[in-house]
Image: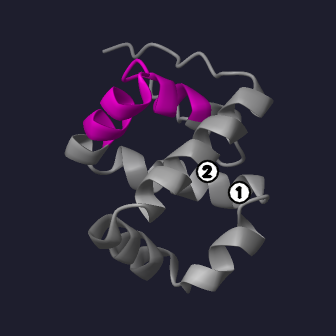
C-alpha cells in the first residue's frame, strides 16, 4: 500500500491557521477545557505560548484528533477539510512517517 505525501502549506500560512484554530477552540468552553487539560495549561498560558510554532503544531494535533471538531472548524472558517493537516505538516514535528 502506498500513501500520498501531504503537501504542506507555507509556514506563515500554517501558523496563521493554527492561531485561528486556537481561537476557535478557546471560544467554546467545553472544547477549551478539553484542550487546556490535554496541554496541561491554564488559560493564561495560551497568550504566552501562541507564538511558539511547536505549540501551534500541538493545537493542530489536538484538532485533527477529533473529526467532528475538525469538520466544524473548517466549515465555520470556510476552509477545505485538508487545510489543517497541510498546515500541521509545515510546523515542527509535522513530518508524517512514510511507510513503504
Whole-percent x and y of residue 3?
40, 17
Which residue is tagged 2?
57
| Label 1 neighbour load within 10 Å: few <14, some 14-19, many 20+ | some
Q: Residue at horizontal 40%, vertical 49%?
A: 63
Tag of residue 65:
none
- Decide: is 5 above or below 62: above
Q: Secondary structure at mark 1?
A: helix
Task: Please provide percent x and percent y for residue 71.
Answer: 27, 34
Label drawn at residue 54:
1
Q: Secondary structure at mark 2?
A: helix
User: Looking at the image, is 6 positioned above or below residue 91?
Assistant: above
- Residue 67 visible somewhere in the drawing: yes
**28 on left or right of 5:** left
Instruction: Name the residue: 49% across, 24% down.
Output: 83
Q: Nearer the viewer, residue 78 or 87?
A: 78
Q: Is residue 86 magenta?
A: yes
Q: Nearer the viewer, residue 48 or 86?
A: 48
Which residue is drawn at the image coordinates 66% and 61% (left, top)? 55
Magenta segment range?
A: 70-87
- The reply to whether the C-beta atoms of the residues labelled 1 and 2 are less than 8 Å apart is yes
User: In which quadrant of the rendered image does the C terminus lie?
Assistant: top left
Task: Indicate whether residue 56 is drawn in magenta.
Answer: no
Quarter occupied by the N terminus: top left
Q: x and y percent of residue 16 in the render?
A: 68, 38
Q: Is residue 32 above or below residue 73?
A: below
Amino acid at each position: 500500500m502506498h500513501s500520498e505525501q501531504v503537501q504542506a502549506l507555507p509556514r506563515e500560512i500554517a501558523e496563521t491557521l493554527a492561531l485561528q484554530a486556537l481561537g476557535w477552540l478557546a471560544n467554546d468552553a467545553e472544547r477549551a477545557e478539553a484542550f487546556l487539560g490535554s496541554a496541561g495549561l491554564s488559560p493564561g498560558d495560551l497568550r504566552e505560548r501562541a507564538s511558539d510554532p511547536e505549540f501551534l503544531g500541538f493545537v493542530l494535533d489536538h484538532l485533527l484528533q477529533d473529526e467532528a471538531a475538525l469538520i466544524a472548524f473548517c466549515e465555520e472558517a470556510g476552509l477545505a477539510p485538508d487545510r489543517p493537516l497541510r498546515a500541521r505538516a509545515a510546523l515542527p514535528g509535522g513530518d508524517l512517517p512514510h511507510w513503504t
